[in-house]
Image (tube, rainbow, N blue to C red):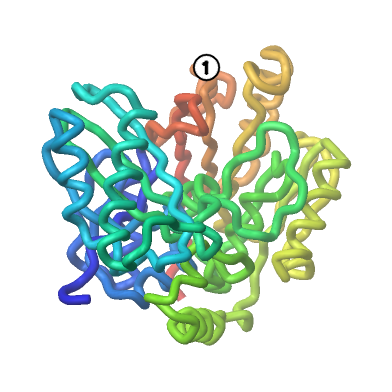
Amino acid sequence: MPGPLQLIATAPMGLEAVVARELKDLGYEDTRTENGRVNFTGDYIDICRCNLWLRTSDRVLIKMGEFDAFTFDELFEGTKALPWQDWIPAHGEFPVEGRSHKSQLSSVPACQGIVKKAIVEKLKESYDTEWFEETGPRYVIEVIMLNDKALLTLDTTGPALHKRGYRKHATEAPLKETMAAALILLSRWNPSRPFYDPCCGSGTLPIEAALIGWNIAPGLRRTFNSEPWPVIGEELWEQAREEAYDAVRDDIPLNIAGSDIDSEAIEIAMAAAKSAGLGNEITFTRQPAASIVPEGEYGCMITNPPYGERIGEEKEIRKLIAQLGRVAAGMPTWSFFAITPTPQFEHEFHRKADKRRKLFNGRIECQYLQFLGPLPPRR
């Protein structure tokens, strides 16, 4: 196929800059950020690499085309003009999903039907057949109508990237793995510093910290929709996986721990860490937040405490925040980070945050509060 591919890494709301920085760190310089996505260019191998390596993105899409579509005719012709035959083989399965916002073509099922019909017409010309069995690899197409512009994409990922493959069970109201990774990347933590989560639930934050600490690609334990695509080929996936295995730095000593008052959560966390190959690297203990004594100096405590509207009652939440504040006050060299929708967090914590950032945990608007301690002395 001529020219580089136009690729899109989708980003949860508020994390676009984090996804863009990840892409730059992976070597993609030409990033362009929009609401909910980061555009960049790459080749077939980059589809494999980005699916394996992106920690904070939801999925990697191929941008097939973008054009004005005020009428169904324009949507049909614009879709049919795109090179679907370069990607979808004669036996490929190609469901169409859709969204519409502020557009004259507001009926999503109608838009999906038109796009499907246009792709079928295009593939008929290429494969000289009237009927498509759709028994082969899966090519999920999405049509997004926004301000009367149609954006057509092909999903290379499949189940979203937060599904790392290490978690079999989760606690109530878990933190998504992508958000956990973002909180760590936005903090001051690095693998030379201790890490502790006093409300660890099913262990997502400590596990994501260990994956980052050892430079383990988060997608190494799962499969992706585009793996059986003939146009990419098994060899490129093997090459990208081998690169990822070679990049693991499991000789770095880690000091990562988490605790929770819920013994069932601790069991789930330990099972997930073991499944991720990190069972010996993370210490999980059942204990209340008030009694924790993390080991080491200049550490980072990063946590997602329970929210009143979801799990605990408000009085209990306030009590927990006050306990965390007392623990933090007794650890002057540590930095403390919390994602919370609780407006009075700083008041109960008895300290003003040094930095705050608006983030959405699922659909809940939160503040990521950062209480910064001193940086470790230079070695």
Q: Residues within 10 Å of mark 1 (few under 14, many from 20)?
A: few
Q: Is residue 231 above or below residue 99?
A: below
Q: Report whether residue 97 is seen.
A: yes
Q: Is residue 357 left or right of residue 301?
A: left
Where's the N terminus, which quadrant?
Answer: bottom left
Q: Is residue 238 above or below residue 102?
A: below
Q: Please give the name of the residue rendered at 16% of the width and 45% of the height, measured from the top-left corner.
A: 77
Q: Please give the name of the residue rendered at 69% of the width and 60% of the height, measured from the top-left corner.
A: 166
User: Between residues 139 and 304, which one lies in front from this camera angle?
Assistant: 139
Q: Please give the name of the residue rendered at 35% of the width and 44% of the height, measured from the top-left corner.
A: 116
Residue 167, how many percent across, how many down? 71, 54
Q: Secondary structure at mark 1?
A: loop
- Amino acid type shown at disc 1: Gln
Q: Is residue 287 left or right of residue 141?
A: right
User: Between residues 248 and 244, which one lies in front from this camera angle?
Assistant: 244
User: Between residues 97 and 219, which one lies in front from this camera angle?
Assistant: 97
Q: Quadrant of residue 110?
A: top left
Number of numbered callouts drawn: 1
Q: Is residue 275 above or below residue 290?
A: below
User: Between residues 238 and 100, which one lies in front from this camera angle?
Assistant: 100
Q: Please give the name of the residue rendered at 57% of the width and 73% of the height, measured from the top-left corner.
A: 214
Residue indicated by mark 1? 344
Residue 159, how many percent across, how many down? 55, 52
Q: Report whether residue 247 is seen.
A: no
Q: Is residue 331 left or right of residue 126?
A: right
Q: Is residue 109 above or below residue 15?
A: above
Residue 348, how many percent across, how many down? 58, 20
Q: Quadrant of residue 31?
A: bottom left
